[in-house]
Image (tube, rainbow, N blue to C red):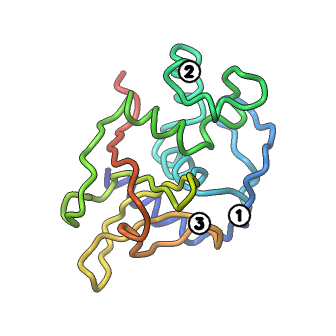
Amino acid sequence: MRKLVAAAVERTHHSVRYDPAYVRIPYPGGDVPADTGVCTDEVIRSYRAVGVDLQKDVHEDMIRNFSAYPRKWHGLSGQPDANIDHRRVPNLMVFFQRQGETLPITTVTDDYRPGDLVSWDLSRGVPHIGIVVDRKEASGRYMIVHNIGQGPRMEDVLFNWKITGHYRYYGPSN
């Protein structure tokens, strides 16, 4: 997980304009333009830097297990879409539950370790996701790399919103 954490921290050196637009991208290994993205794109790019293609992995899992994923996020076509499915927080949450390790949601700072993924409800069902990194703030909490609108940032935001998921994912098991 050290390489994933380093990749997430490295993302904070990029200038990224928040843009949730649907974009047709190559498959596998596709990405929206490097200067655009949302919270999920920072997770995707961090994993891609360590050789894990979440676009491919999420898409393949959705093809095999489409009914496991939330209908609200199925998109207009009602079938898996490799252009967008991996860019939706609820789909990543299901994927990490299915393919990774689901960890307890607690208010204990030490339960959240570098490399963990945390998802939140910002309010009114608006989902968000970030990666816990190995840098601590004065609070003693590990910081989070996320993009909530000002590009990738490393901030002490772990308990700023209602936590909806806590995961560990090391990549495909095979």
* Relative to 65, residue 113 above or below: below
Q: Secondary structure at mark 3?
A: loop
Could you tell me if the residues under marks 1 and 3 are in contact, i.e. CB atoms within 8 Å?
A: yes
Asked where in the image residue 139 lies, by quadrant, the reply is: bottom left
Amino acid type of the residue that numbered disc 3 sits on in the rendered structure: Ile
Q: Could you say which is closer to the camera, residue 82 or residue 20? A: 20
- Identified at 49% across, 54% down, the residue is 129
Q: Amino acid at mark 1?
A: Tyr
Horizontal arrangement in the rendering, residue 20 relative to residue 105 (left or right)? right
Between marks 3 and 2 in the image, the one whose residue lies nearer the viewer? 3
Q: Residues within 10 Å of mark 3 (few under 14, many from 20)?
A: some
Label 1 to label 3: alpha-carbon separation: 8 Å
Residue that extends furthest to the front in the rendered view of this protein: 124
**Which residue in the structure is indicated by mark 1?**
18
Residue type marked 2: Glu
**Residue 84 at x, y percent in the picture:** 69, 37
Q: Quadrant of the C terminus?
A: top left
Q: Helix, strand or loop at disc 1?
A: strand
Which residue in the rendered view is the most extreme toward the top?
A: 64
| In contact (CB < 8 Å): disc 2 and disc 1 | no
> What kind of element bears circle 2?
helix
Q: Earlier in the sequence, mark 3 or mark 2?
A: 2
Q: CA distance from mark 2 to mark 1?
A: 27 Å
Query: Who comes first in sequence, dot 1 or dot 3?
Result: 1
**Identity of the residue drawn at 41% across and 71% down:** 160
Q: Which numbered disc, 2 or 1, marks the residue that appears first in the sequence?
A: 1
Q: To which residue does mark 2 refer?
A: 60
Contact check, label 3 and label 2, Cβ < 8 Å: no
Which residue in the protein does label 3 denote? 148
Q: Quadrant of residue 5?
A: bottom left
Residue located at (30% from left, 59% from top): 114
Q: Residue at x 75, y 58 (%)?
A: 19
